[in-house]
Image (tube, helix red, strand yellow):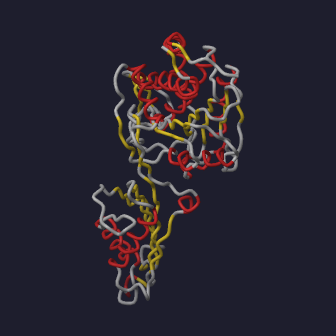
Amino acid sequence: MEFPPATGEDVERVLKLVDDNADRLVGFLQDFIRIPSVWGDGAALTEAAEFLARPLRAASVPVDLPGSGTDGMPNVLARWGSGRDDGLIFNGHMEVYPPSRSWRRDPFGGDVADGRVHGVGVADMKAGTAAMTMAVTMLAEAGLRPGRDITVLAVPNHFEGGEGTRQALRDGLRARYAINCEPSDMRVLLGQRGIAYVNVSVRGRAAHTTALDIGVNAVDRAARVVREVLDMPITGPDGRVLPDLKICNVAQISGGVAHNLVPESCAITFDFRFPADQTQECVLRDVRAAVTRALDDLDAFPAEVTLEATCEKNPRSSLRIGDDETIVRELGAAHRRVAGGDPGLDSHRAWPDTPIFWEAGIEAATYGPGSMDCYWDDEFVPVADYLTAIKTYAVAALRLTRGERG
């Protein structure tokens, strides 16, 4: 069945519905924040999935909770429309990082103050996930059935390299377009950095503190590796030094077994966010070269450089797209229709699931409420941005699945 293009009256109807239901929509986000869906907590993430499914089902949008590729926690998969698989996917995740101990508010309180919704993970990315869910709910409640399928895909395991999104695509999910709703400061993003979590295991020789001449201190050797890795240049596939900013965090380090023994091993994890002109293989090569420069006794005391397991399973590639892509133009047009101004273009230093769609032949871009800083004490999203995102997603969905007339 073909549906006529959306009219200006159709657009106004759904925008008015959002305005009329603003308190309800904000309350939905607050309640979502109050579910402590910390990464890896299957019970809480299942509760979050059931929570997102509820308003969609109430609006007669069919919803399933299929497997996500991680045991004990489902995806949310809501497909609504005419049965045509050349439509639009909205994509977001449900899990959040554990809050720091420096919060001054209840991190799971969902407080609203000074026009902001506060809560752990509200930027990364409960506001975006709630907004895409409510955008489709509002379209359904307004009776604006899409001409091509609109899919809501919320996953519980984005932090595992987009595993839930990959699983949905492995299970046969298809579309022509996708909007990833990660925080973008309300800009349309043309790209993002990739991720390489690199583990370096350094060996030494155990001894008592009183026999330092016998021991070889693995922690001291690891410190030399850290300094060299932080100072090293980054290079592209051809080995040439790249001018891009290097983003490298010494994320974890552990070594030693007792306060009076020379440590015989030390493990370091580096978090690299590499630019579009690099790959994770480039990062591994750079780190191995840095280890070789830092340590002159590798034959006797070898060091191992490996990728973290989820990077092996689900490589987080970088992305760069053009501003002439249809998804970019339509998102920009939808934002202008709602907000009255240009959203601007940017690139993300973090890693949304967007490249996964391009790898599957689905044209995708990132746009969502919240700061691209992603994680900070007393994290917040402006209420106005959350509501603007709901409207923008609804208008973009109409334009991409039915077109717009007038």
- Residue 376: tell me if it is visible: no
Determine the image quadrant of residue 342. top left
**Residue visible at 40% across and 42% down?**
322
Is 326 drawn above or below residue 260 in the view shown? above
Left or right: where 294 falls relative to 78: left
**Residue visible at 36% across and 29% down?**
343
- Residue 57: tell me if it is visible: yes
Left or right: where 343 falls relative to 330: left
**Residue visible at 67% across and 27% down?**
80
Task: Name the quadrant of the N terminus.
Answer: top right
**Residue visible at 47% across and 60% down?**
197
Number of numbered discs on residues: 0
Left or right: where 75 falls relative to 206: right
Is 98 drawn above or below residue 106 in the view shown? below
Where residue 114 appears, as percent x and y from the top left, is 36, 21
Where residue 99 appears, as percent x and y from the top left, is 47, 42
Q: Nearer the viewer, residue 209 or 181?
A: 181
Where residue 158 appears, as percent x and y from the top left, is 55, 46
Determine the image quadrant of residue 221. bottom left
Where residue 67 appears, as percent x and y from the top left, is 70, 45
Q: Nearer the viewer, residue 352 or 332?
A: 332
